[in-house]
Image: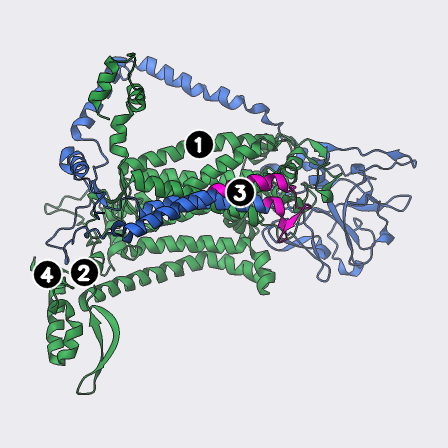
Amino acid sequence: MSPDKFHDPDFERHKAGKDNPEDYGHDLDRAPDSDPDAEPIPNPGLPEHTPRPTDVDERLERRAERQVAMLFLAAGLLSVLFCVAYFVFEPGIEGETFVGMGASNASLGLTLGLAMLLIGIGAIQWARKLMGDHELIEYRHGAPSSAEDREEALAAFRAGSRESGFGRRKLIRNSMLGSLALLGLPAVVLLRDLGPLPGRKLEHTVWKRGVRVVNDVTALPLRPEDLRIGQLVNAEPASFFEHEGPDGETVPAEYEGTELIIEKGKAAVIVVRMSPEEITPVSGRENWGIDGIVCYSKICTHVGCPISLWEQQTRLLLCPCHQSTFDLTDGARVTFGPAARALPQLPLMVDEEGYIVAMSDFEEPVGPSYWERG
Amino acid sequence: MSTTTSKASVGRGGQKGQKPNPVAWLDERTGLAALSKKQLRKVFPDHWSFMLGEIALWSFVILLLTGVFLSLWFKPSMTEVEYLGSYANLRGLHMSEAYASTLEISFDVRGGLLMRQMHHWSANLFIASMMIHMLRVFFTGAFRKPREINWLIGLGLLQLGIIEGFAGYSLPDDLLSGIGLRIAEGIMLSIPVVGTYITFFVFGGEFPGDDFIPRLYTVHVLLIPGILVALISAHMLLLVYHKHTQWPGPGRTNNNVVGYPLMPVYMAKAGGFFFIVFGVTALMGGLMQINPIWLYGPYNPSQVTADSQPDWYMGWLDGGLRIMPAWETTAFGFTLSWNVFVPAVVLMGLLFTVLAVYPFIERWITGDTREHHLLDRPRNQPTRTAFGVAGMTAFGVLWIAAGNDVIGPMFNLSIYAITWFCRIGLFVLPVLAFIITRRWCLSLQRHDREVLLHGYETGVIVRSPEGAYSEIHAPINPVSAYNLTTHERRSPLELPPREDANGVRAPQPGKERVRARLSRFWYGDDVDKPTAEELEEAHHHAAEHGQLDGGRHVGIETGGHVGGDDFDLEQAPNR
C-alpha cells in the first residue's frame, strides 16, 4: 500500500485554483506574512508528510479496522443492554441498588454512556488511524467583499432609496417612523395585566392585634412559660392553621394555597427568650416584649431569605444566604453582613388565656428594601 | 456529479428505465452542489483548544434532547397538590405540581432521573465550556478583526446561557430553587423607581404567587432556546466564513489555513466528539448525583437550608451580594439599596460591558486595523494577558466570597475574616495579578529571546582545564526556533507633535497623545525577538567562544553550525 494512497493531485490542483488569493483581486487589509528580510528565521514551510504505521503496514491497518469495528459492535451490544436494564430494574432510589446507587439509574447511565462513548471513540480512531491524514492548505479570502461588489451594493441601495423617495418625501417618512414608534405603546400596554400594581401590599402582613403566635411545625400556640432562656422558636400566625377561636370553637385555616405561601413569605417570625437584663430596649418599644421574650420578622432585610441560624451563646441570628448577622439583644441590629436594616419587630402581649399574641401588625414593611419603602 | 449530467437528467426526466439519481434529484431542487463542492473539503486546523467551543455546542444539543424528554412529564404549575408518588419521605405532603412532577420524573419514570441529571450536568458543562472557550479566544487574540462580531455573539450566548441555567434550576420549585427566586425578587426590588412594579409584573403579584413557574417555563423552553439557536447558527456561519484561526507554525501563515478536510476527517472527529460528550454526560447522569431536589423538600418561604449555594456560574453574583457593605440611602421618602443594586445589577452590567467593548478598546489603543488569523501566544501580549488574569482573579474572589459559609467550616476560618479578605481582595488582588502576570509574560519573552540567541540549557556542566565550570547551551531545533519568532515585531505609536511644522495644531492632539501613551503602556516593555543580525552574531560568537573553550564544548554547543543537516539556524542571516 502506498503511503500516498489518499493523495489526489487532481483535487488539490482544482482546489488551489479555486481558492487562491489572487482570484479575489482586491487588497487584503491584514497582518502581512512575515517579511523575509526582517524575520530572523524564514518560514521553513509545511513539513513532509510522515506516513503512519497503518499507512505502511497492512497488518496494522487491518488491526485498526478490526478495532474500530469492535468498538462499534460493543456499542451496539450496550444499546441492547440499556433496553434490558430499562425493563429489569425498578426506577427510584428505594428499589434495587447498585454500589449504593439506584440500580435503574446507574445501569441506564452506564450502558447509554458507554455506548455513546464507544461510538465516539470508534469514529475518532477511524479518523486517526485509517482516514487520510494529509494536511491540506486552503487560502483565506479577506472578510470584505471586493471594492466593485461593495460599490454595486451601494449603488443598488442608492437606486432603491431614490426610487422609494425615502429621503425626499419627508412627510411620508416621518409619519411612517412616527406610526412605527407608536406601535411600541400597544406592545407595552398589552403587558399591563401581567400583574396588579404594588399598592401598599408590601407594607402589611396578616399579623394583627390578638393573633396568636404558634409554632410553625406543631401549630400549637405558645405560652411565655413554654420558652426557656436562650430558646428560639420559628413561629407563624395562628390564622395559617386550623386553630381555636375566641370562644373555644375550632376555626379553619384562613389562608391556603397560593395565598398562604405569599403571606407566609411575609409573616414568618422567630420568637426568642433571653433574660431581660441582656436586652437593650429600643426606645418606644419597651413594652413590645414579654419578660425577655421578643419576636422579630424571620425574613431578611437584605434579599428576603428566611433567617434561621441561631447562635445561642452570642444571641446572634445569622442569615444562611449572605451571612447578615443580627443582634437580637439589641433590637435585631445588623452587626455584620450586607443587610442594611434591623429586622422589624413584632410587638407581643399575652391574651386572657395566657398565650402569646401580637399587639399589632409590624410597624414597618418586612423583607428587602424597595424604592417606595422610604 | 457534474452539471452536465444534471442537465441531461432534466431533459430525460420521466423516461422509463432511467435509474433514479438522488444527487441530481436533490440538486435540481436545491442547487446544493455548488455549496457542497466548496464546503465538503473545507479545511479546519487542528489544536486541542479549538475543541472547547465544540463541547459547548454538543452540550447544547444534549440539553435540547434531554429537555424535550423532560418536558413530556414536567408540569409547569404552581397549583398545590398532595404528593402520592413513590418517594415515601414526602408522601402526603402538599407541594406544587411542578415539584411533584419533578419527583415523578425522578422516581416513577424509567430513565427520568438519568435524563434529569444529564440535563443538569450538561447545563453546567455548557456554561463551563463557553467560559473556557471565551478565555481561549481572549488570551489568543482570536477576537481581533474580523471576528469582533463573533466575540459579541459569543458573549450574548454566555449571558443567555447563564440566564437559561438559572431559569432551569428554578423550575422544579424545590426549597433551594425557591430561595434562589426569593433572592432574585430581592434584587428586582432593589432597582430604583420601577423595581416594585417589575417584581409585581414578573410574579403576577406578590412573591411567589402562582404565575411565575409557568411563565418561567415558556422563557426556559421557548424564548431563550430560540434565541440561542439563532445566535449559535450565526456564530457558526461566521466561523465558516472567516475560516478558523490557527496557531502560527511552519507553513502556516496569516493567508492560509492548514489542516484536515471536513469530509471525512472532521466529520468523524467532530461527529465522534458529539458521542463522546454525550457519553460522558450520560455516565455523569448515571453515576454522579446532581441537584437531588427530593432532599430539599418543596418550597416554603419560611424555610431555608444552611449552606445554600447557587449553581456555580451564579456564584460570582452571590459572592458580590455577600461582600457588599450594608449601604442604603433613604431620602425624600424613597429608598435606594446600594447593598443589593450595586453587586447584583451594576456589577453584572459592568462585567459584560467590559467584555463587550474590550476588542474595540484594544484595537483603538494598538491602532491595528488589519485582519488577524494567526493566534497569539499569551506571553507575547503581556498587557492583554495581564488584563485577562486580573479579570479572572476578580471573578475568583467573588466566587470564594459566594462560598464563604462552606469554606469557613472546612478550613476552620472565621466567616467574617473571609468576607473581609474578599472585600479588600476584590480590589487589591486583580492589581497584583495584573502586575505579576505582566512581568511573568515579559520574563517568558526574555527567555524565548535567550533560547533563540544562546540555545537551551542542556544541563551538562563542563569543567574547563583552568577549573571553571560552565553549562553547555545547545541550539533548539529549527521548527521550535521558527515557532518562537512567528509573532509580529511591534513598536508603540509615536507621541504625535501638538503642532505640525507650520505651527498648525493637530486635530484632537489630546486624544492622540492619550492613545500614544496607552500604546506605550501596552507594548513599550515588550522584549522583542532578535533580528537576523543579532541571531547571526550570537551564533558567530558562540562558535568563537566554543573554539576558545576546546573541542568537546564546541562539539555540543555549536552543533547547529557544524552539522547543518540537523540545525540550519545559521542559514537565516544569509538570506
- CA distance for labels 2 and 1: 48 Å
Q: Position of residue A217 (x, y in %)?
A: 78, 45
Instruction: Identify the secondary structure beneath mark 4.
Output: helix
* Residue at which label 3 appears: B118
Q: Position of residue B151 (x, y in %)?
A: 35, 41
- Does residue B448 show up? yes
Instruction: Identify the secondary structure beneath mark 2.
Output: helix
Q: Where on the picture, by quarter, is residue B270?
A: top left
- Residue B478's tag is 2
The numbered mark, 3 or 1, whose residue comes first in the sequence reads 3
The numbered mark, 2 or 3, whose residue comes first in the sequence reads 3
The numbered mark, 4 or 2, whose residue comes first in the sequence reads 2
* Residue at which label 4 appears: B571
**Chain of the residue displaying label 1:** B
Q: Which three-letter amino acid code belongs to the residue tagged 2?
A: Pro
Q: Position of residue B341 (x, y in %)?
A: 53, 44
The numbered mark, 1 or 4, whose residue comes first in the sequence reads 1
